[in-house]
Image (tube, grey):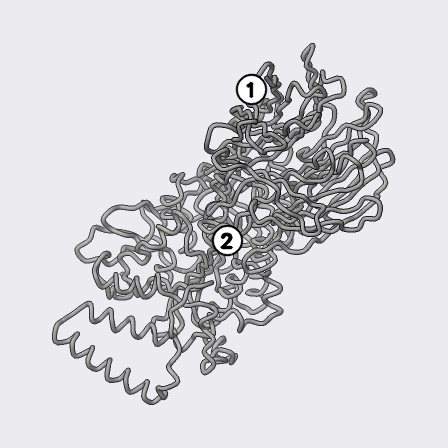
Amino acid sequence: MNQRPNTSSTCGSPEHAVHRRLFLQGSMAAGAASVASFNGLFSIPAAAEQAKRQGKKCILLWLCGAPSQFETWDPKPGTSTSGPFRAIPTNLPGIHISQLMPRCATIMDKLAVIRSMKTEPSEHFQGIDVLTRGDKPRPPFTRPILGSVIAQQLGDLDSPVPQFVLLDPCPEGNEFKAFKSGNWAGWLGAEYGPVRAGGKYSIPNLGRLDSISELDHQDRETLRAFLSRKYENDRRSEAASSHNAAFQRVAGLMSCAPLFDLDQLPPADRERYGPGAFAQHALQARHLIENGSTFVMVANGMPWDNHVFQHEMHQMLVPELDNVLFQLITDLEDRGLLEDTLVIAMGEFGRTPWLNEARGRDHYPNAWSMAMSGAGIRGGVVHGATDKLGRNVVEGHTDNRQLFATIFRALGIEPDQEYDLPGLPTFRRVEEDAQAVEEVLL
Amino acid sequence: MSEATKTLTLKKTQDWKLPTSVLDAALADDENAMIAGCMDGVYRLQFEPHQEELLYQHESYVSSVGLLKENQIVSAGYDGGLRWFDVEQRKLLRTTRAHDFWSWDMSVSADRSRIASVTGQYLAGSYKYEPQSEKEPSLKVFAADSGDLLHQLPHIPSTQAVAISPDNRFVAAGNLMGEVRVFDLDNGQMAANWTTPDFTSWGIIKSHCYLGGIFDLQFTPDSQSLLLCGMGPMRDPMAGNGRQLWQRWDWKKETPTLLDQTHQGQSGEGLMETLAIHPRSEHFAMGGRLRGGDWNLALFDLDSGDRIASAKTGFRITRVQYTADGKSLFVAGTQGQPKPKKDDSPLPPFGRVERYEIG
């Protein structure tokens, strides 16, 4: 075992509830972060340079609702399942993707696409659970979400910058809403849960009051910390410990507020990424990664669930994704960060080869696609294949465990490692000895 | 419903199937055949004796078809093209690249001299996903005989429905955001412009973006008012459960005015995609998809707006059209696509055409 000490007990404790309220539901708004005294804190190149040295990081473009593989990575031109869009050639000889992705077609040599995802859940909640945690639930134990594992393994808990950030401006989201209100960090403990930001999510009154000087502010915090630590020692209280952690996290958030302010980002960058919320938050993810975050998950509700208006929606969503991926990967490469930053774009399953009566495609876990680029990933690889109509995987079957083994390996994390969970059954990061997809790994 | 409004019946008398979804259709002049724009091409469906023939294809789905003079037809497609075809000679006459993006809808003027087609890709234009401004003219008008481009007219994408007034003087187009623009066909000047918010959803629950909009519009026979159809706003547009909605607007007033809309208690849920007005202006028909309720095809009194007949077809309706005598109604559409077989051998047919007697 070579893991960091597990500072938290099992999931579901009152302490965790304190964290969840503060860190999962509570969050920061782009707008609320306009705290003038903190502006420019991370504008010095040395800070970014420090972040660059910290090791591997990950951006998950969470395409919640489940995009269609036919209108993205695995088009089937000239067949009954193709839909109305054409396929276009890419810079990989013989490889075609949807005409809705012309920019990605020019950087396929930097991408690894898995066209042979085959998973079990066909409903959103279960699909989200499996594709963000890596495995099916085993109640009452809660497996930590990918971002929590990566934050724990690769993050710098002493950093004032949140290590795991969820950028999602949509307060609703049906099954994703239900999922968001659950326990993300699982048995790792709430300190590895996400800070949520984006859109209207905010921690009100984040800035120090004008009536309190910086010195007063520090004095008050010193006194609070002393009393709290004394209480914690006298009573052996885990709740007090969590409370202290919460205060420390809030103090960190206060110091890095500008990172969450979209208006602080260069206008030219904002224009390149595109004006939509998903695109803007993808840019913000890059900014957070550049400045010390370890895992940033970008979502926008679950817009990909196109049971109706499949083509009418994908004709808007896919071009935005296409541009976001292109800009993100190109930017990270230009900044020398791609080698250490894994970019993942996926949803919880794919969509049916056939169209329903409402001009939509329904849920389809039997054969779907996802893409990765950057840290540890070999670009220019298309792994696996589906049959002529996209009904089934015919080559390179990859399930959620194999995918997670691949992601962990790409980031230098041992997939087979056991968690250190005294009193709990044995859990591994990836169960059943699932093997990574070697073809897509460097 | 007012006491004076007479109720009618819709009785299915014939039905036919086509291999793929019928996305638009036009009844031949002899009323013994239908030209059907389908996912896989343009078909001629002859009723008696029954015969179906794939005439030609686009590079993608066919979105609209229309009849022209001298046995010609014109079609528009998701490939952005317009195609002219001589039915008698079975010969493709002309292909025009009308749009970079797909043609959402195409309409032929009553005198068959003009063709109007609308396009526009909905792309994110703001943090809230208001649509970007157009990258190409959203509305184009062509001469039906020569294919010459007569007008390129502006709108906001996606522009999804178009109609030419019966007097051939105006063209109207409606978009995703419920904005209607009416242009004078003589000079291309905008004659009216207004927005109805009642057809558009901003996804609160799942999708922070816009969905819906106007899916069909028709001038009334006197060209004085416009009927629009679509689906009422939803918190979750992915549910497709908005109110089955039509609206009638007096577009010639200085400020266009809403005259009437689907009456309370007379609608179910589902996207309404097609309108047709009775040849003697007695009523109008509206059809679409049934998501909730008990009808997806209905007749409405043109004066009172009351629903006077309804039916449940069991498939999504994409086009309704009266026969010339106004005694029958042809309905075209589609069921869900069957699961494909392993070898891509032909699927069971899922395009639908039905005839209803109005009693």
Chain holding disc 1: B
Residue B73, given in percent of the width and then of the height, sits at 78, 28
Residue B208: numbered disc: 2
Q: Residue furthest top?
A: B49
> Is residue B61 rendered to the left or right of residue B86?
left
Residue depicted at x 60% and y 60%? A274
Would you name the residue on which mark 1 appears?
B9
Q: Amino acid at mark 1?
A: Thr
Residue A185 locus on image (x, y percent): 31, 58
Q: Chain of mark 2?
A: B
Toward the left, the furthest residue is A234
Residue A33 seen = yes
Mark in the foreground, 1 or 2: 1
- Residue A192: mark: none
List x then y, in percent, for residue A413: 38, 59
User: Please, what is the three-letter code of the amino acid marked with disc 2?
Assistant: His
Question: Which residue occupies the foreground of this view, A291 or A55?
Answer: A291
